[in-house]
Image: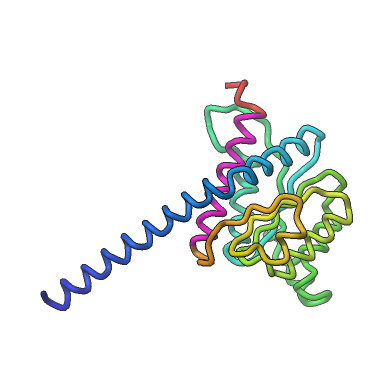
């Protein structure tokens, strides 16, 4: 076999291995996280029925997930379901606020400061951290709890400190950051879809 053919075969094997590992993680999510996912939906629907809002935060890829899921809630998931916007705010999008906070009060407090400013009793914070050990996210959870908000954690590995801080921990059963992030966006899509279907599906 030529070097080029070996390289092609190795690449194809890597693609297969990665997809199979991702699929296996999703199966573990089904067996280990379904109740927590349902609990997250109940928590958010309960808050929305009381006229409350959703705040989301995370770092890096988790910041992207926070923005992605906020967009799904505000805009829509299923175009066949005609519904009003769901109030959701990603705390990761204001560069002036984030850089001022990092410079003036320390990055580990930037999300907590935003929760203090924007959060109210009965709102929900969705805290996204693959390790559960991000101090900027964990401090946001602490602030949310002090205000009287409900808290949901999209976590991974052993859940870290965040697992014991949040009301509803959803811990992707993997130690691989990529698999955890893939799990988080899948879980987030399921949560957003169920909220939309259960609150507004009857308007189809």
Of residue 92 and residue 163, the one placed in the foreground of this image is: 163
Q: Quadrant of the N terminus?
A: bottom left
Write the residue at 48% across / 51% down.
Answer: 26
| Place of residue 14 in the rendered image (x, y in percent of width and height, measured from the top left) | 32, 66
In the image, residue 11 lies in the stretch drawn in magenta: no
Of residue 158 and residue 69, the one placed in the foreground of this image is: 158
Of residue 191 and residue 106, the one placed in the foreground of this image is: 191
Q: Is residue 141 above or below residue 81?
A: below
Q: Is residue 15 left or right of residue 157?
A: left
Q: Quadrant of the C terminus?
A: top right
| Place of residue 47 in the rendered image (x, y in percent of width and height, measured from the top left) | 78, 39
Q: Is residue 127 left or right of residue 30?
A: right
Count of numbered labels shown in the rendering: 0
Q: Is residue 161 above or below residue 117?
A: below
Q: Is residue 199 above or below residue 68?
A: above
Write the residue at 77% across / 47% down.
Answer: 124
Q: Is residue 41 above or below residue 79?
A: below
**Res 53 quadrant in image:** top right
Colour theme: rainbow
Main secondary structure along the magenta-highlighted residues: helix
For this orientation, the residue located farthest to the left is: 1
| Place of residue 201 in the rendered image (x, y in percent of width and height, measured from the top left) | 60, 25
In the image, residue 183 lies in the stretch drawn in magenta: yes
For this orientation, the residue located farthest to the front is: 31
Q: Is residue 174 left or right of residue 144?
A: left
| Place of residue 122 in the rendered image (x, y in percent of width and height, measured from the top left) | 84, 43
**Res 113 quadrant in image:** bottom right
Write the residue at 76% across / 63% down.
Answer: 111
Q: Which residues are magenta?
A: 179-198
């Amino acid at each position: 076999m030529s070097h080029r053919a070996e390289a092609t075969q190795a690449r194809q094997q890597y693609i297969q291995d990665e997809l199979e590992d991702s699929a296996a993680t999703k199966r573990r999510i089904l067996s280990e996280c379904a109740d927590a996912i349902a609990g997250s939906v109940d928590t958010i629907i309960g808050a929305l029925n009381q006229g409350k809002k959703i705040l989301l935060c995370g770092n890096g890829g988790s910041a992207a997930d926070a923005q992605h899921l906020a967009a799904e809630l505000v805009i829509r998931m299923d175009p066949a379901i005609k519904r009003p916007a769901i109030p959701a705010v990603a705390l990761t999008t204001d560069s002036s606020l984030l850089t001022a906070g990092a410079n003036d009060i320390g990055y580990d407090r930037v999300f907590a400061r935003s929760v203090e400013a924007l959060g109210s009793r009965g709102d929900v914070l969705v805290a996204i951290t693959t390790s559960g050990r991000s101090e900027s996210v964990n401090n946001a959870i602490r602030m949310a709890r002090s205000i009287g908000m409900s808290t949901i954690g999209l976590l991974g590995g052993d859940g870290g400190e965040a697992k014991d801080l949040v009301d509803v921990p959803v811990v992707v059963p993997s130690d691989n950051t990529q698999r955890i992030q893939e799990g988080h966006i899948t879980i987030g899509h399921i949560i957003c879809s169920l909220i939309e279907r259960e609150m507004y599906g009857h308007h189809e």
